Image: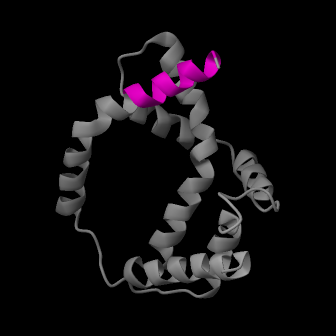
Amino acid sequence: ASDVYKRQAEYTADYLASTISGTKAAVNALSKLLLSQCITVPIQRHALTGSKESIFEKINEYLATVPERELERIKRVNTLEGARIDVTHPPTVHRIEYLSKHEIRDPKIVLSESNAENIQLELQYFEAQVQKKLTDAYVSGLYS
């Protein structure tokens, strides 16, 4: 299939996901993808200091301090033709715009607070492993 059809399939997949989660949750998830490049700084600090604190807490603290102008810059960069996962994926900003124009207000599934807490507890089991992989990847990137 051509890249145009593959990109359209991504928009369709995003829309179908929003029919389950609602547009607000789908846009929120895509918006977080835009912030992925911002987590390098807290990972770097964590790796270089040998901190024993949770890297995820540090990432969340750092993301809370990212200035609005930086978020806008990230969005502008993302709209550039080359700023996508690959040629089959439209820029994330365009995917967010598409969902915003095809709003689903009422999600079919809403995660309860207790289920969210249970998921968080299950994910905590993997935090140490993921933290080590993130810091090891950063350190190995210094010497490659």
* Point 32% across, 85% down: residue: 108
The relative height of residue 79 versus residue 132 in the rendered view (above or below) is below
**Residue 54's quadrant in the figure?**
top left
Count every numbered label the image shows and give the total.
Answer: 0
Q: For residue 44, what is the image quadrant?
A: top right
Residue 110 screen position, x and y as percent: 29, 75
Residues rendered magenta in the picture = 132-143
Query: For this view, does 128 lie left or right of residue 28?
Result: left
Asked if 39 appears above or below 7 in the picture, the reply is above
Residue at position x 47%, y 22% in the image: 136
Query: Which of the pair 110/134 is nearer the observer?
Result: 134
Q: Specify the principal SS of the magenta part.
A: helix
Q: Position of residue 94 (x, y in %)?
A: 70, 71
Q: Where does residue 49 sit, x and y in percent of width and height?
A: 49, 11
The quarter of the rendered structure image containing the C terminus is: top right
Residue nearest the viewer, comparing 142 with 80: 142
Direction from residue 60 to residue 89 in the image, left or right: right
Classify the position of the N terminus by image quarter: bottom right
Q: x, y (%) of residue 81?
A: 82, 62
